[in-house]
Amino acid sequence: MRLVASRRFQSIVAAIPGLRRIARADGEALFDLVAGFVHSQILSAVVELRLLHRLMDGPAEARDLATHAGLETDRMTQLCDGAVALGLMRRRRDGRYAIARRGAALLGVPGLEGMIRHHAVLYRDLADPLALLRGGETELSAFWPYVFGAGAASNPETARRYSDLMSESQALVAEETLRRVDLSRAGTVLDIGGGTGAFLTALGQAHSAPDLHLFDLPAVVPDAQARFEAAGLGSRSRITAGSFRDDPLPGGADTITLIRVLYDHDDATVAALLRAAHDALPSGGRLVVSEPMTGGAAPNRSGDAYFAFYCMAMRTGRARSPERIATMLREAGFAEVDDHGTSRPFVTHVLSGKRA
């Protein structure tokens, strides 16, 4: 590695045709790391100005986009060219801009635009990464106060802000979870911390057999009831208001789901929750855990870079590997633990455990 770090060695490699390609690839990858924040901010501006939505109606000149956005034409041209470089737009031969495949895909991902918009809070915390690593106060923890317990999220507007953002992106998580684990023959599914019922709604629409039981803070109950009724699931659904940190879990379910819950909390809280879930299940009952996870011994970008630092900024939780969660499930008493894997680690990873 000392040889690779040598400037003289790098110069020699750059002059050899066979190795030049490797050196260039490494250089471009390093530059992407350096420029990553700028790329993210270009993306943020494109989303805030709804440029991709505008281009879905057809190609447009920078001048027209600038007038609509209240920017100078020259600045809009630079923004659009940046978006072209990032693969979000393409520039036609006539000089007009059109949406590219990646830009269209962005619009098709539920909740992605909302996540991009709220990243401004995370980026302010990451402006001083060393302060974040040393455990300083963060703005993101105030943005998501629900993680500190029911009292911190008693404000309905706070609960709605969280639930709206989560429910928008829950569609992909539900899709991946239901593809990985079969819940079609479950009797009653208790979703703990399920917000306004986005996952249970997806489950109810996919399978007609399970009864649906939501357990979450009182502030989300009205919106959850409205969601179930609108989906035609009112007769199959039940809502119990409460906090798993402060209240006992409802009984009667043969399946419990924890969808994007564990990584919001520290190990002690997670261990207590898993034990409570185990005790609330009957013999043979199943617990399903679905959330983004780290790569463990093989770190990955989505889990070990993005979600790990996001959780760090929230100050209460942490992203964990499938192996770590499996160990915690066994420590909580689950005898059979299965890793159902993932095809999209940036969306979720699914594990389950059965009570003996």
Image: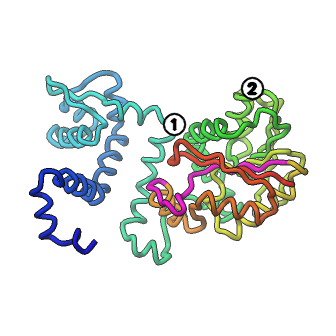
Q: Is residue 248 left or right of residue 147?
A: right
Instruction: Give the residue number, with chain letter if any, for mark 2.
Output: 232
Residue 76: image tag: none
Q: How is the image coloured?
A: rainbow
Dot 1 lies on which element? loop
- Left or right side of 7 for 242: right
Where does the image place residue 292, in percent across and percent down from the top left?
A: 56, 52
Question: Is disc 2 placed on a helix, strand or loop?
Answer: loop
Q: Quadrant of residue 144?
A: bottom right
As shown in the figure, which amino acid type bears the numbered disc 2?
Answer: Gly
Question: Badge 1: few (under 14), some or many (20 or more) residues near its Cα, within 10 Å?
Answer: some
Asked if residue 282 is among those painted magenta in the image, a careful observer would answer no
- Work out which quarter of the rendered image holds the C terminus and state it: bottom right
Q: Give 336 or 315, whichever is nearer the viewer.
A: 336
Are dots 2 and 1 in contact, CB under 8 Å?
no
Q: Which residue is mark 1?
A: 110
Q: Residue at x 60, y 61 (%)?
A: 145
Depth-wise, is mark 2 or mark 1 nearer the camera? Answer: 1
Residue displayed at 42% across by 75% down: 131
Q: Is residue 290 above or below residue 311?
A: above
Q: CA distance from mark 2 to mark 1?
A: 21 Å
Magenta stretch encompasses residue 290? yes
Looking at the image, which is closer to me, 178 or 318?
178
Residue at x-position 70% and y-position 70%: 268
Locate the N terminus and report the quarter of the image it occupies. bottom left
- The image shows residue 102 at horizontal and vertical percentages of 36, 35
**Residue type, mark 1 in image:** Pro
Residue bounds of the magenta highlight? 285-302
Give the image location of residue 100, x and y in percent: 31, 30
Picture residue at 18% right of the left edge, 38% below the top:
77
